[in-house]
Image: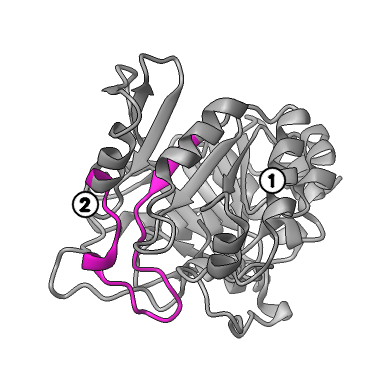
Amino acid sequence: MLAPTSSAAGASAGLRDRHGRTATDLRVSLTDRCNLRCTYCMPEAGLPWLPRPTLLTDEEVVRLVGIAVRDLGVREVRFTGGEPLLRPGLVGIVEAAAALEPRPEISLTTNAIGLERLAGPLVAAGLDRVNVSLDTLRPGTFKDLAKRDRLDATLRGIAGAAEAGLAPVKINTVLMRGVNDGEAPELLRFALEHGYQLRFIEQMPLDAAGVWRREEMVTAAEILAALRAEFDLAPDPAHRGSAPAETWLVDGGPATVGVIGSVTRPFCGECDRTRLTADGQVRNCLFARGETDLRDLARSGASDAELADRWREAMWGKLPGHGIDDPSFLQPARPMSAIGG
């Protein structure tokens, strides 16, 4: 197991920003590489991957996660990619994160290819839950969207996660107009049948090609209308808090479906996230135009306290919202695969 570092600093001074929010949810990208080529994320030919020397080592990831948890008040850690299952040291990283005090909740966002084999070891290491990206149940549509014929592998991975005890498995779905936007009820029936929790996510301007157009996006309102054609939906009385999804009771409950309206129903005022890229850059917002380098600072010999202070500075400058509706909005230079979900 990788040994987490220790620090004398306390967690009282958390990751606050000037708008009164405190980040307690850390998203850690472990790689920008992926074994799918989903059209809303990257081109079929892939992208120029980050050079390996620029990536955080396993030990560096563990050190920075430890600083976030012990010194900065982070309570939830989610490992993302690209595709995090491609990271050779993933199980050891999860095990080290689970050994931290206080122990954070640990989750993983994945396309589930390979999860059938890795779910058991990840649960043994301390993984608490998993979110799986699944945009269609139709093999032909999957291949059109992801440019790979891997639907069966994804479905096996989802089933393997549930069997390993990562229940309830959460399913994340992006609907694309004219591609899979007619599948919302079908996907919800699938989730209900297997006991999975389904969440639809509005497509965001994070594609590598920069061709996202708001008018082409399937909105939260359209998603709900499609579901209501076949299901009775009622607002979930449970408090949403900082969760990005609005949830709805399906046919009286207790099953729910979520809709994340990142564009048309933004939740920036309740955002509690901070992000660390695979090459060690802090992003205080998914749509931030700037980053703060912790990798080079750490490699230059900085102490845990110095790294924590730099992280606090990065979060203090967080803007009040993502600004997608502002005429001056510019899409981040990095696509989703290089930022981390």
Total numbered labels placed on residues in the image = 2
The spot of residue 147 in percent (x, y) is 61, 72
Percent x, y of residue 162: 71, 31
Question: 185 and 290: which one is in front?
Answer: 185
Residue at 26%, 52% (x, y): give it. 219
Q: Which span of residues is magenta-colored?
A: 198-221
Q: Quadrant of residue 106?
A: top right
Where is residue 127 drawn, in percent x and y?
Answer: 71, 36
- State left or right for residue 167 relative to residue 275: right
- Residue 151 position in % (x across, y down): 67, 55
Asked if residue 296 lies left or right of residue 163, the reply is left
* Name of the residue lying farthest toward the left: 327
Residue under label 2 = 264
Kindly report the secondary structure that dominates the magenta region of the rendered protein. loop
Which residue is labeled 1 in the image?
155
Based on the picture, tell me whether residue 199 belongs to the magenta stretch. Answer: yes
As drawn, is 338 to the left or to the right of 111? left
> Disc 2 residue type?
Thr
Q: Residues within 10 Å of mark 1 (few under 14, many from 20)?
A: some
Quadrant in the picture for residue 272: top left
Scheme of colours in the image: one colour
Q: Residue at x 60, y 55 (%)?
A: 80
Front position in the image: 94 or 203 = 203
Looking at the image, residue 228 lies above or below residue 209: above
For image coordinates 36% across by 59% down, the residue present is 203
Depicted 226 relative to depicted 167: above or below: below
Residue at disc 1, secondary structure:
helix
Q: CA distance from mark 1 to mark 2?
A: 30 Å
| Label 2 environment density (alpha carbons within 10 Å; few <14, some 14–19, many ≥20) | some
